[in-house]
Image: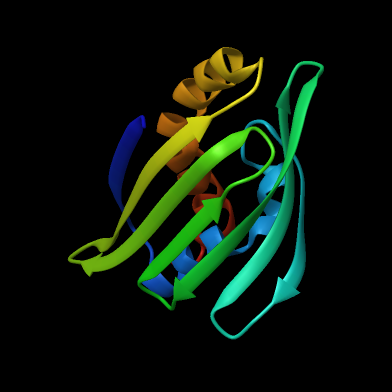
Amino acid sequence: MPVQQTSRLLPYRSDQLFQLVLDIEHYPEFVPGYRRARIVRRGDDALDVEQTVGFGPATFTFHSTAEFQAPARIFIRATDGPFRRLDVEWRFVEEAGGCRVSAETHYQLHGLLAPVLAGWLDFLVPRLLDAFAARAAKLYAAEA
């Protein structure tokens, strides 16, 4: 199962970045490839989400569960759509100068378009923190 890890120190509080990552319904506004995201169930420490992602004319819809421990961790798992399995773990650790945001992604794909989707994920995942950093700057710049 391919694994991708990325980490960055951002000049914001962990609670701000935690809420930004948990605000899944706004991903289509700033995460490349996101077409739609809808929370279908909210719990005290979990969300069930329906998401549609794509590139060009190809789109894929899948469901995921985001379990969270505010403001330190979000764990996302999907096992439908094009994913045999998708796990994304976000961690938020306060450090001098801000918050260290780390994301680790594991995925297995199935279906005829798996090689194409794998190429898209290999392109997208390393850029996720760029998208979140830009969104944080837009939302929180006045507070930093």
Vertical placement of residue 75 versus 6, above or below? below
Residue appearing at x 40%, y 31% in the figure = 126
Quarter holding the C terminus is: bottom left
**Total numbered labels:** 0
Residue appearing at x 55%, y 13% in the figure = 115
Question: For residue 110, which quarter of the picture?
Answer: top right
Vertical placement of residue 26 versus 128, above or below? below
Residue 49's x, y, as percent? Answer: 70, 59
Q: Is residue 43 left or right of residue 67?
A: right
Looking at this view, name the residue that lies furthest to the left: 96
Q: Is residue 112 left or right of residue 140?
A: right
Residue in front for this viewpoint, 113 or 138: 113
Residue 134's x, y, as percent? Answer: 51, 44
Residue appearing at x 55%, y 64% in the figure = 66
Quarter holding the N terminus is: top left
Looking at this view, name the residue that lies furthest to the bottom: 44
Vertical placement of residue 74 versus 118, above or below? below
Q: Is residue 99 left or right of residue 90?
A: left
Residue in front for this viewpoint, 73 or 144: 73
Residue appearing at x 33%, y 34% in the figure = 3
Vertical placement of residue 36 versus 97, above or below? above
Residue 68's x, y, as percent? Answer: 47, 72
Structure colour scheme = rainbow
Camera sees residue 143: no
Camera sees residue 1: yes
Residue 138's x, y, as percent? Answer: 58, 52
